[in-house]
Amino acid sequence: MLSDDRRREIAAFLRIRRMRLQPEDVGLPRGMRRRTPGLRREEVAALANVSTEWYTWLEQARDVRPSPDTIRRICAALRLEPAECQHLLALCGYGTETVQNGAPDETVIRPQLQLLLNRLAYCPAWFLGERWDILGWNRAATVVHGDLAAMKGIERNGLHQIFLNPRMREMLVDWERHARDAVAKLRMVHSRYIGDPWFNELIDLLKARSPEFAAWWDEHNVRLPGSGVKVYIHPEAGGLTFHYATLEVKSELGKPLQMVTYMPAPETDTEEKIQALLSTSVPSPAVSAA
């Protein structure tokens, strides 16, 4: 049986995805004037080969649980992207293990993994837990995040850094695009932690203190970890351009970790600037944030 919180998440996700589609997007005639945006529930139900009453119950967070095959038909009807379909399956309890009561992530980064970070001398790199807590980092990471060792508790968190650290907001070029991307990636992970107090501690804090986060969280966008380019305007070094990549690894206890690596763009002087910044006194890296 799905929890009330999980059913509400499913209902909200489906309503938002239905409302973004127009009849012509799915090969249907527009017909008479519509009072509300998007497809009608009966249209989605017909496209997914389910009854209108049953689909209505699903959007009303009633006590129904679709099968994986039914979910995939709904995904096709709503023209969902692969990440969105994966997210909906996870919300319904399929394809990934759900967590009932998470706890503060006290994962200790294995010495071999910390050595890997340290060997990336001029590439800022760090390990994220599932809630985006920063659990281990190298010296170069302080160029981007500042003195991580001095941060306490939830302050040492990737989303907290993006939304509540003025230094990060000032440095990161095209902040809104990257901030939206981060929210979508956290949403993807959140499907495992619906209703979990530990995970909700971060979400509630960000919603209370950041109007942007609150608005973008309610859009229910999701995205898988990936790669791209980020540009920072460092207060001392000026422009820094990185190609970033995210790799998934396991902690010693088998917990999922993301290794985020920022590689200085080869066509720039970013690496030389990092070398210069690291030649001054910087905080030592931490093997574990616990």
Image (spheres, grey):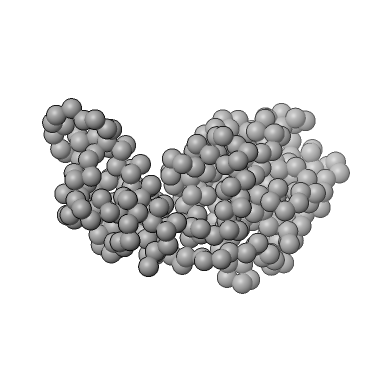
Vertical relation: 197 (above or below) 59: below
* Residue 1 higher or lower than 4, as above or below: below
Q: Residue placed at 29% from the left, 51% from the top? A: 75
Q: Nearer the viewer, residue 197 or 178?
A: 197
* Left or right, 42 with reference to 151: left
Q: Is residue 37 left or right of residue 177?
A: left
Q: Residue furthest right?
A: 281
Tell me if I can see residue 117 in this picture: no
Residue 273: horizontal and vertical position, in percent? 74, 35
Q: Quadrant of the C terminus?
A: bottom right
Number of numbered discs on residues: 0
Residue in the foreground of this view, choosing between 120 and 170 = 170
Return the x and y of residue 33 as percentages of the image width and height. 18, 27
Give the x, y percent position of residue 62.
32, 57
Specify the quadrant that holds the N terminus.
Answer: bottom left
- Residue 12 locus on image (x, y percent): 38, 47
Dividing the picture into quadrants, the one containing residue 104 is bottom right
Question: Relative to residue 66, is residue 124 drawn left or right?
Answer: right
Front-lying residue, 221 or 8: 8
Residue at 54 percent across and 43 percent down: it is: 182
Residue 1 appears anywhere in the view: yes
| For residue 77, above or below residue 70 | above
Residue at left offset 70%, top offset 48%: 155
Q: Residue at x 16, y 49 (%)?
A: 46
249 in relation to 223, above or below: below
